[in-house]
């Protein structure tokens, strides 16, 4: 007699929802062993099926299996199983239904949580998942280092901004990780959530001059590091064109600055897929001014970080080091068959330095070729398993080798009282892994 397969413990509607999430590659690793799985699916099922009252959809919010409590907040005990009555009291901004193993509570906050960044911080502060339905019907789930979004009955995922910190600092090791994460989080989870486009210019060296044009902002004391300033900064950005210059602590120095490009930059940095006018201008400006990083935010949410003419925050690209790490973890018994080497290579056309990563597997050799990440000119070729390159920030007067002097920004009056603290971040180490004689192995034939 054939052995019966174990019966699915989920109700049919939750099982269908789980399959829909899996089909869209939205489930985190070890999802089926997650103790919060059923509670999360129940609240997500309620969120994606809103009841319309007087032609309106009510907001909703739930906090699933938190490990910590919110300070200075009220928790009201729910004496019965969560139903429509209690869920109707959780608006997803100042009140949330709390589901955990000991029962159900209603969390009431002193002040509303208004942005995607607030929801992310709530999930991290409590150690739980946050499910939120906005009044326009969009549903978001915060947890597992990502935001899962359902909008117009289609699913997508958005990684937390901190996921780009490592990628950016591989190209710009001089950028403080604290300020970088704060800036990217504000751009992605606050401005992006409000569909506000913006351009920021952050300099790793003192700004030698301020523009004649635009709006001086230093006297206002606004800073991206202060969460209470986010609303004021966002509203200002929603009313202007041009870029905003930032000081070393992410304070606003000058607004409505138009980034000017030379013919040389325009000849090397061409229009690419996904580049709008804002992106192209930012890329060319960062190419001409090696001391700056330019961050752009599109109205539809994606952020780009430009250094030396290249976007250094492309999370979808797989580098050779990522392939090396992935294969090392998936087949650890073959770790001694793999080698990772890094080299600094200068492009003969644009003169920018790139960090080339070479992943080799003993016994496997194919000719791989790379173009410059800045100008696409042929850069490097090698017989290996995987080859990748990313531009590497080099600054005059640092420990880097072979730099050109810093290019001063356009214009006039020196900024008084601006002391740009040196960021003590070591230069990215270049590692060369020794070659070993080992039996041949081809990972592509696994």
Image: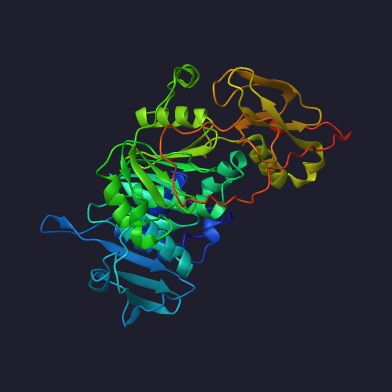
Along the line of sight, which residue is nearer the eye, 63 or 224? Answer: 224
Picture coordinates of residue 387, whole percent (x, y): 67, 28
- Picture residue at 71% right of the left edge, 33% below the top: 401
Q: Quadrant of residue 304?
A: top left
Q: Quadrant of the C terminus?
A: top right
Along the line of sight, which residue is nearer the eye, 241 or 81? Answer: 241
* Residue 368 visible somewhere in the drawing: no
Picture coordinates of residue 42, whole percent (x, y): 37, 63
Judged left or right of residue 18, residue 86 is left
Along the line of sight, which residue is nearer the eye, 325 or 430? Answer: 430
Residue at the limit of the structure toward the left, as seen here: 54
- Picture residue at 28% right of the left edge, 63% below the top: 60
Judged left or right of residue 347, residue 360 is right
Q: Quadrant of residue 226?
A: bottom left
- Picture residue at 39% right of the left edge, 51% below the top: 189
Give the total of numbered labels. Answer: 0
Picture coordinates of residue 419, whole percent (x, y): 52, 51
Give the vertical position of 136 relative to 341 (above or below).
below
Picture coordinates of residue 205, whole percent (x, y): 54, 42
Q: Quadrant of residue 71?
A: bottom left
Along the line of sight, which residue is nearer the eye, 120 or 353? Answer: 353
Colour approach in the figure: rainbow
Residue at the limit of the structure toward the right, as seen here: 437
Q: Quadrant of the N terminus?
A: bottom right
* Residue 289 visible somewhere in the drawing: yes
């Amino acid at each position: 007699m054939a052995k019966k397969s174990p019966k699915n413990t989920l109700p049919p509607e939750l099982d269908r929802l789980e399959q829909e999430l899996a089909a869209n590659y939205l489930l985190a690793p070890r999802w089926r062993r997650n103790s919060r799985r059923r509670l999360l699916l129940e609240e997500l099922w309620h969120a994606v099926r809103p009841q319309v009252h007087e032609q309106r959809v009510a907001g909703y919010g739930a906090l699933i299996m938190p490990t910590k409590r919110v300070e200075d907040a009220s928790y009201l005990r729910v004496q019965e199983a969560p139903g429509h009555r209690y869920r109707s009291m959780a608006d997803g901004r100042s009140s949330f239904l709390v589901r955990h193993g000991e029962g159900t509570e209603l969390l009431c906050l002193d002040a509303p949580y208004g942005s995607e960044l607030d929801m992310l911080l709530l999930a991290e502060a409590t150690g739980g998942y946050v499910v939120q339905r906005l009044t326009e019907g969009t549903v978001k789930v915060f947890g597992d280092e990502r935001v899962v979004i359902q909008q117009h009955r289609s699913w997508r995922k958005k990684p937390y901004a901190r996921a780009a910190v490592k990628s950016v600092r591989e190209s710009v090791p001089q950028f403080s990780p604290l300020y970088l994460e704060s800036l990217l989080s504000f751009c992605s989870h606050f401005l992006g959530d409000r569909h506000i486009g913006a351009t920021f210019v952050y300099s790793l060296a003192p700004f030698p001059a301020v523009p004649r044009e635009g709006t001086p902002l230093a006297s206002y004391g606004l800073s991206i590091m202060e969460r209470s300033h986010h609303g004021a900064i966002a509203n200002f950005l929603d009313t202007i064109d041009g870029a905003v210059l930032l000081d070393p602590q992410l304070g606003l120095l000058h607004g409505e600055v138009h980034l000017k490009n030379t013919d040389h930059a325009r000849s090397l940095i061409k229009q690419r897929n996904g580049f709008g006018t804002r992106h192209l201008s930012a890329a060319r400006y960062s190419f001409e001014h090696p001391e700056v990083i330019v961050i752009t935010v599109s109205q539809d949410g994606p952020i780009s970080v430009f250094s030396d003419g290249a976007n250094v925050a492309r999370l979808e690209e797989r580098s050779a080091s990522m392939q090396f790490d992935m294969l090392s973890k998936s087949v650890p018994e073959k770790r001694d068959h793999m080698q990772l080497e890094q080299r600094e290579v200068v492009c003969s056309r644009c003169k920018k330095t790139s960090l080339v990563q070479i992943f080799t597997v003993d016994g496997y050799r194919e000719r791989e070729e790379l173009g410059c990440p800045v100008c696409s000119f042929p850069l490097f070729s090698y017989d290996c398993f995987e080859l990748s390159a990313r531009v590497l920030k080099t600054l005059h007067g640092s420990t880097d080798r072979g730099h050109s002097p810093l290019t001063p920004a356009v214009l006039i009056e020196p900024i008084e009282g601006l002391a740009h603290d040196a960021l003590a971040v070591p230069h990215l180490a270049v590692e060369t892994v020794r070659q070993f004689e080992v039996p041949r192995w081809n990972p592509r034939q696994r």
